[in-house]
Image: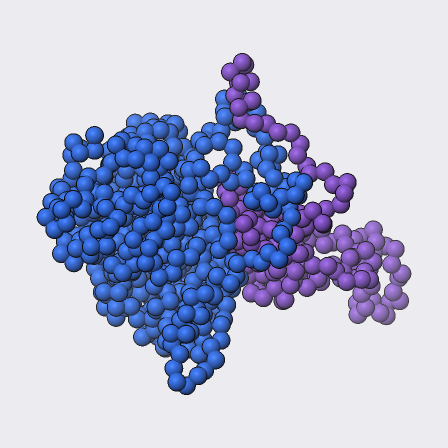
Chain colours: A blue, B purple
Amino acid sequence: MADERQLSAVTSEALSAIEERFPGGAKPAEHVGLVVDPSQLVDVATFLRDDMDYVYLSCVTGLDYPEATNGFPARYEVAYNLFRTQGDSLTLHVHADRENPVVPSLVEVWPSANVQEREAWDMIGVRFEGHPDLRRILMWEGFEGHPLRKDWHEAYYEDDQKPFRSRFPAGDPSLAEEHAAFERNVQYPEDWVNDGFLEVPEGWKSRAEDAVYLPLEEIAAATETELRTDKVVLNIGPQHPSTHGVLRMVATLDGETIHGLQPVLGYLHRNHEKIGERNLWLGNMPFTDRLDYITSMYNNFGYAVAVEKLMDLEVPERAEYIRVIMGELTRLMNHLVSIGFLCNDLGIYFTAMLYALEEREFILDLYEMASGSRMMCNYFRFGGVAQDLPDGFAPMARELVFERFPRRVDEMETFLLDNEVFRARTTGIGILPADVAVAYGCTGPLLRGSGVPYDVRRAEPYSIYDEFDWDVVVCNNGDVFDRVLVRFGEMRESLRILRQALDRLPEGPIEAGKVRPTTKVPAGEAYGRVEHPKGELGFYLVSDGGANPYRYHIRTASFVNLGILGELCRGHKIADVVAILGSIDITLGEVDR
Amino acid sequence: MSSQESTLPQLPPELQGTVQLSVLDQLYNWSRKRSLWPMFFGLACCALEMIASFDPRFDLARFGMEIMRASPRQSDLLIVSGTVTKRMAPQVVRLYNQMPQPKYVIAMGACAISGGPFKEGYNVVSGVDKLIPVDVYVPGCPPRPEGLFNAVFALHKRMDQERIADLHWYQKGEEQGIPVPELGPDLIDYRLTASNIPSDYQPARLKTVRPEQVVTQGEEG
């Protein structure tokens, strides 16, 4: 039973504090954390934030339990992962009725809940009462159904679990097109299909585009002054050279000044979570590569850390060193490329980018030596890495880390930071105050550029980061320039860690036992997080003891960091939007998942 | 080229060295294929490898493609580099319609070819050729820059074989653009509505293998 389970010290401390203040407001949850009564959720959350120091809401996850589990009835559920800045974690669960799933919104308490609650509404269909702008975020307005519900099936649906029974053991696969409607991956409501063909109803009109502009009208109305000026609506993207992919922004302009700006997401929503809940545990590893496709190794790292938390696996020392080497190479590469992209946006057309890409190729060479692939490495396994480093790896890595990269980082810094135009375009632009950054759940260089020395590698050390000598890089002004400075500093710190790791790289096994593809993971729930180059990457995993994840939710830094974009751009000129966006450093694969 | 050159009339000796005779088709294709302007249009992971093929190590500029244009009006090659989602589908079709003729499409990577690893997803179009015509497919997830080079060379070969007299963009009549899909309860492709489909059209449902049938077969075997 849930009540007899051992609670962690932090959770029981929180439970007794809540019990004292709000009697009967919380009880232990099925696996980890507390279940809070919906009617008291906002009060409990405010109490936790103000009196118990849980200032940082990391992840909001919607869950669907169509059947009763372990003493709890069938329900929709929302899980909140809270953190103190020292790293203590607390998970809150709120249960919602299956007929009418409504939960109070926590946007007032933690603004970082804004985008994540919209995602939970879109995917699971839990309505958040009091949310200022509850629209779909990844799918378009008007889409039929909430895709992550367990009973929602897409057109190519074949089976609940992989390997599909048509593939294994019988081995008579059929093309998905063969049993999908219209030879394509589409499905319509019953009254839309006539005689096997699509029949669009008379007078039907798509709501997808209109919904995009709704909040802008509200912003325009709220900022109306005595002097009436016409607001111009400007679309940026999804096909735009400075949006780093298929991001779309809609802005209202007063002259050249931004009045309101909203990112419109979902143009690269590739259904990682729906597919991930069908995959075998190990089968998700190659999919994590494609989340943030610039830094595939670190996504592997995050997923491996989260699953190892569930499985309680010990990783051998050599594997940990290899992981850290790969992770820090990734950070170096990501920061180089992100600065290159930022320069691209600022109008230094391709030159700085080419300097960054030249170095990136060398790191990709190292990846290819170790994993066999340039970009999609699929290199980590639960309890280790896929294969040992080849003979030529260490000499080449040493040559690059000790000789080449430090010089190239210095060179790039000299070229850029002393450049008058670069400084003029970045200094004082997009200032993010520290308290706002924490409230909006910003992480990574964006947060550290605002003067908050918060790094998951320090706050909640995973792997062997606590064995190395390195510093958390912080700058205090919170503008675009400081974020670039933080990235330069972090590249130097990465090189520092790399030098130590390469010097001390021990011999030994690279995997804790043999991990088979059909590895089963014990029932439970875990939130594993790592300091991805762009910020905090978290995997919220629920296992029911089977070969597939029951719930597989990815909290990505790019997605949550984008929630602040509108605030940062307000009042700036239209040309600064691309600079601010470039300094947040997003990858669309990670934003839309 | 040499076999056709021999059929050309001989120039008088005083003009040799200043005048070059060629077949108009060859001249036209030669000049066109070395000045393709790809659109600066990255969709997903493959876009990174597309950018990498412009980097100092690979340098696609060697083949006359150093300029990428962000506007479809100025480009003649669309490299679909990544997963085409349903939400993005209207934009992809619109961009294709906006490109001036002659225009070519390279489907780069598994996702653009068939949906790739994300094929089963509810928001993924299973292959960009379901929306727009594709000239060259590059397999890989993602393809290496060399793979993209190979696709460009394949496209060059294809362009070499085109003849001005047959090219459809020099024919009479106006080109109809592809109807832009809309976002409804699911992606609405107007080419698939009942009114657009000829009466003798048979949906290509080859065979239906239900999972449960397969399992019984497997158990018997």
**A464 left or right of A180 in image:** left
Q: Is residue B114 visible?
A: no
Q: Is residue A418 above or below residue A101?
A: below
Q: Is residue B221 above or below residue A257?
A: above
Residue at the spot 29% in from the left edge and 30% down from the top edge? A522
Q: Quadrant of the N terminus of chain A?
A: top left
**B69 left or right of A582 in image:** right
Q: In which image quadrant can residue A571 be found?
A: bottom left
Q: In which image quadrant can residue A10 be found?
A: top left
Q: In which image quadrant can residue A348 be found?
A: bottom left
Residue A20, image x, y percentages: 10, 48
**A493 left or right of A50 in image:** right
Residue A208, image x, y percentages: 52, 58
Of residues A201 and A3, the one drawn nearer to the viewer in this rendering: A201
Of residues A448 and A506, the one drawn nearer to the viewer in this rendering: A448
Residue A184, image x, y percentages: 60, 42
